[in-house]
Amino acid sequence: MRYLPLAEADRREMLRTVGANSVDDLFVDVPEAARLSGKIEGLADHASELSVERQLGTLARRNMVAGEVPFFIGCGAYKHHIPASVDHLIQRGEFLTSYTPYQPEIAQGTLQALFEFQTQVARLYGCDVANASMYDGSTACWEAISMARRVTRRGKAMVSAGLHPHYVSVAKTMAKFTGDTLDIALPQLTDGAPGDDMERLLGGIDRETSAVVVQYPNILGHITDLSELAARAHAAGALLIAVVTEPVALGLVRSPGEMGADIVVGEGQAIGVGLNFGGPYVGLFACKEKFVRQMPGRLCGETVDAEGKRGFVLTLSTREQHIRREKATSNICTNSGLCALAFSVHMTLLGEKGLRQLAELNHAKAILAAERLAQVPGVELVSGAFFNEFTLRLPKEARPVVRAMAERGVLGGVSLGRLFPGAEALQNGLVIVVTETVTDQDVEALAGALEEALA
Amino acid sequence: MNVNPSGWRPDMGASEGGGETETFTGNRALMLEESLIFELGDTGTTGVDLEPKPSAATRLGGLERNRPIGLAGLTEPQTVRHYTRLSRQNYAIDLGLFPLGSCTMKHNPRLNEKVARMPGFADIHPLQPTDTVQGALALIEMLGEWLIKLTGMHSVAMSPKAGAHGELCGLLAIRAALEARGDAREVVLVPESAHGTNPATAAFVGYRVENIPANERGRVDLDALKSRLGPDVAAVMITNPNTCGLFEPDMAAISEAVHAAGGLVYCDGANFNAIVGRVRPGDLGIDAMHINLHKTFSTPHGGGGPGSGPVVFSEALTPFAPLPFVERQGDQFTLVEEESAGEHHGQSFGRMTAFHGQMGMFTRAMAYILSHGADGLRQVSEDAVLNANYILRSLEDVLDAPFGASGPCMHEALFSDKGFRDGLGTLDLAKGLIDEGFHPMTMYFPLVVHGAMLIEPTETESKAALDQFIGALRSVAERAKAGDQSLKAAPVHAPRRRLDETLAARKPVLVYKEPEQAEAAE
């Protein structure tokens, strides 16, 4: 067995040192009834590297690969080009095979990278501080709602209709058990303007509101000024939580922090992390400095060593489960360190200049694609202001159209029917994302496939 | 441009302890100091070349950025050098034995990395039509089947993102099951030796946490547990093997007692590596257990994640498992989500993450499992337990082993700081071990032992590596017992000396501020 270095002779010698006749003697505490005498039934024996690669390669080939077809799917996970050096660097064994940096003297590499990551995230989001990452955007979103409860000591969150429905589902799952109240609604396909949802949120804020939760750009791709919402929330003693699932947008549009958001969370996958069928991703979590002691998750901070040299450590751990146990701000332990590193490396390669160029390229391509698709007979562009993702209204239910396009080898967006099953008014909606990976030919292929599927 | 980012200047004199000649740069040959990206780069530099953007009138609704962000950029060669230099300040399994107890830092096979990067797994979107991702769904189902068989349980939830998220999954299912029978209970019992995530998770779900005492053999005190059970106890969370590295021989009796009192049993599977292939937790009557794919099944820990924490369930809890999950119908795989759950999975407690779980970890774990097979996995637990006992017996003459007399340990060996002299403690020994070229063991955990040192070597260490570690630890332990005060200064050979954690917590600096900004803030 190629991963097990002990030879039979080693095992015999070590058993002698231990004073055991056989390895079975080491399992004496396991009651006889619980011991398996032989191998577990129905499972294969060990296999060569070549054989494993073949078996799994067969499964991999049964999937339609985003990079090999015209691809327009977003809604919380985005395909961007990742520079080759990102994957090279995160595969260095000293990053890949290291542990959570509990021994800072021999983990300065991870710690400094996390400190840089926190700085990048805080600046991108327009916040004072950021943590060292969460599992993903959806869990970060719930943690933010939970944190707002601790800060305000209130339990009613007003949730925008534009929040990713899976994020809403996660929050609903948790709220059932924590007693939080979530005021939720479905988005509308009738108008690109955010009017109705904004009025609902503004009207719903009262003295029991812990937070207003709004996604930016939202699930339909729309962008809306959050300033008034922030002001009204603050006037009522509530917090504004902004959720960002496409961080590239912030290269071009104002950050939620600048517009007054107290906590900004989101999905960082779009920068540095591949699609991976949904995970692992990296949750981003930032807030105003005054709330830092209510934050969940790991925090890396600057300090000095015994010689006065600058160094970094995990800090404020009295918030955390391994110290505070049942009084911790969250139960999170392992987060998404290596994905945070990938995010940070990619962001370093981009820099502000590159991020802005990337965002401009996405935006311009998306506008041209939206205009082209709106020429397909029966198709209407619903979105007004948007970044790289927009919503079309089709003359019929979008879900079978998406499947029909997939059969023609085009992954043509996400139907709102898939995201909001049962919501009749949304069934004709189709959300399309256009990133720098999309070519003019891809857009023509989508327009053609859409026209055929609608015919 | 900061030439010497360490802060040391020639007029500060030579540093204490090291005694070596200071250099102009602050570097010491291959040990290279490295500035922050915000000190190295600027906002006008980029390491990417993009195609020119086509001409189009913007549609941003007046929300264009009107302020700089402050994101420093580097070109590719600078970026590669920055992170390569940083990487060299890290200890890693690739460099040596990583004996963190309860963390199972085993070798990360590179085949797994290769498989996870196959475009058919890495470059597919979670919202693609399910017809276009049949291979991915098949892999999730296949891994799930292995986990069910290895644990002897009834079903599996694959979506939890890490161990603590798995605990959350298990407790949500337990709470949903109890509420479904109209039996709201308030208390979760947790042994004092449990991981901090156990009580934190129970509290996160709204339970009150009470401790269960341990007996003098380091196991759950069965009589004390029984006397506490009653109509208010929702669940008991037990780690088995426990955090003292010992198997709970009364586990089946514990499960029986908890069930008889109307409660449910959660097993923390962090230490599954000790028993994989030899014991099926399902045979011990448990109702839910998470499996850390980043421990037992070797997915890399990556400096703090990503992990993956699938949860296996008993038949009683299966109806309450989370969405989404993969279902097999003949050759076809479907994804059961909110929409289709209604008909036959209406009692699910709901969704706990946006998508379907940590696919990138599933592929790695599957490659690991197929590589080992049923026979190899059994050898894994045997070698892991043998290695831990070898360490226990090779060091118990020099280090106090509080439960050493009660018999063999499982996958990890527990020692205390008893016998250390003149104010030296576990921390000093750990830092001394750093100078010897090893990552320290888990320190001060579990809480039930004074100055605890928990050592888990794993099965991927050779006898020679173990012997070298034992020799180093013996040497440092002898210094601690002799009261050698030089240990207080350790480490002296690491990239940094001991760091001031009190300062970091008292005056938190969590983000970089440019010198002018920092001054303005003073």
Image (cartoon, coloured by chain):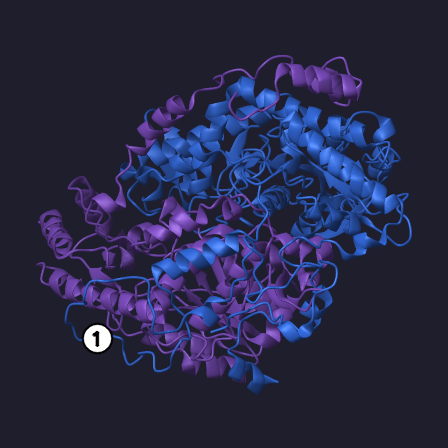
Task: Identify the amino acid type marked 1.
Answer: Thr
Q: Is residue A89 left or right of residue B500?
A: left
> Residue B76 or A211: which is nearer the viewer?
B76
Residue furthest to the bottom in view is: B520
Q: Nearer the viewer, residue B493 or A293?
A: B493
Residue at left offset 37%, top offset 81%: B67
Give the quadrant of residue B29: bottom right
Q: Compared with residue A126, is residue A449 higher up or lower down, i.e. above or below?
A: above
Q: In the rendering, at what x and y percent does residue A146 appear? A: 58, 63
Q: Residue at x 65, y 69 (%)?
A: A293
Residue B434 rendering spot, x and y as whole percentages: 69, 48
Relative image position of residue B148 (x, y in whole percent): 53, 27
Q: Quadrant of residue B5?
A: bottom right
Q: Is residue A132 or residue A202 the one in the foreground?
A: A132
Other-residue count near label 1 (Cα within 10 Å), few / some / many at <14 / 14–19 / ≥20: some
- Residue wearing tag 1: B58
Quarter placement of the C terminus of chain B: bottom right
Which chain hosts label 1?
Answer: B
Q: Which chain is purple?
A: A
Visible residue check, residue A238: yes
The vertical placement of B495 against A291, above or below, is: above
B4 sits to left or right of B229:
left
- Residue plotted at (19% across, 67% down): B53
Viewer can see residue A31: no
| Whole-percent x, y for residue B62 in the image | 28, 81
Chain coloured blue: which letter?
B
